[in-house]
Image (cartoon, rainbow, N blue to C red):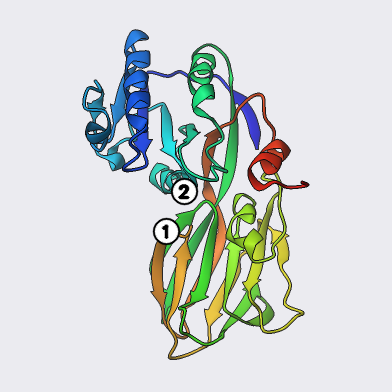
Amino acid sequence: MLERRLLRIHRVGLMVKPKIREAGPVIEQLARFFAERGIEFLAEPVVQEMAPGCRATLAPREELPATIDLLIVLGGDGTMLAAARLMGGRRVPVLGVNFGGLGYLTEFTLDELFPALERLLTEEALIDSRMMLDAFVHRAGQCVAEYSVLNDAVVNKSALARIIQIECWIDGAPVTTFRADGLIVSTPTGSTAYSLSAGGPIVHPSVAALVITPICPHMLTNRPLVISDRSEVRLALRTPREEVTLTLDGQVGFALQVEDEVILRKSAKTFDLVSPVNKNYFQVLRDKLYWGK
């Protein structure tokens, strides 16, 4: 959901993809920019390697969210997904600058960074609040793991495992048993990630929906399914003696056992992105995914 918000920025945090050599001069320029405006600039210790002359207050990454008014991310989509988990639902806006490859979530280029920061200090910001997904793993009636993700939760087999069986319920009603290499449950943001590669639909971020996409299903009739974001999805692994993992945003994994259940529902948390004022969602689709070309 897009909204305009006037930000009161006194402390800015920086999160950087490790080992990006070209980020050094940008980090030093950011430090000067905020120092000239009397804004405290906090960065994780890794910036010392990239920008030794940077005059930033160093703080562990996990301490940044509780103390800042804006988070700047230099990296790619993987760094932004890590930032979404780091923020933990705090309504602190995140401005992503593309230092990666695709950069679908990091919408700003280096040339756009400092003009955008100038606008944020004097004008209302355009904030895109993205839905997140909560995932819970139940084993023998006990919750043994829980996560919040921006893109997707995926139940998938290892490279050497056979086809697995995943029983699915929506709001307590039995849906089907998927026989496939795995199953993706994604948010609208995640609809353009792994789900899209597996044949799922593109869902606009403003649509209140979840997408269930089987990975290489054994049955041709097992097609992707779009459901309400108010629904609860319950998955049960029915295949024994296979290596199966619940993967969260492609970055965190949890080993599943037969009869484990995965509960998925819309999170109360959101991830607040600073959006460029001169771009729209469909332009990003065209520029990043070559959609319609």
- Residue of label 2: 81
* Residue 169 at x, y percent in the picture: 64, 75
* Residue 258 at x, y percent in the picture: 45, 85
Left or right: where 253 falls relative to 167: left
Left or right: where 89 falls relative to 277: left
Please report contact status of discs 2 and 1: CB closer than 8 Å, yes or no. yes
Indicate whether 77 appears above or below 229.
above
Quadrant for residue 201, please give it.
bottom right
Question: How dense is the environment of label 1, judged by Cα within 10 Å: few (below 14), some, or many (20 and up)?
Answer: few
Camera-side residue: 210 or 158? 158
Q: Is residue 231 visible?
A: no
- Residue of label 1: 251
- Residue at figure coordinates x 69%, y 43% from the top left: 285
Kind of residue at disc 2: Leu
Q: Residue furthest bottom?
A: 241
Left or right: where 235 falls relative to 38: right
Q: Secondary structure at mark 2?
A: helix
- Residue at figure coordinates x 46%, y 90% from the top left: 240
- Residue at figure coordinates x 45%, y 32% from the top left: 92
* Residue 147 at x, y percent in the picture: 43, 59
Kind of residue at disc 1: Gln
Indicate whether 267 appears above or below 175.
above
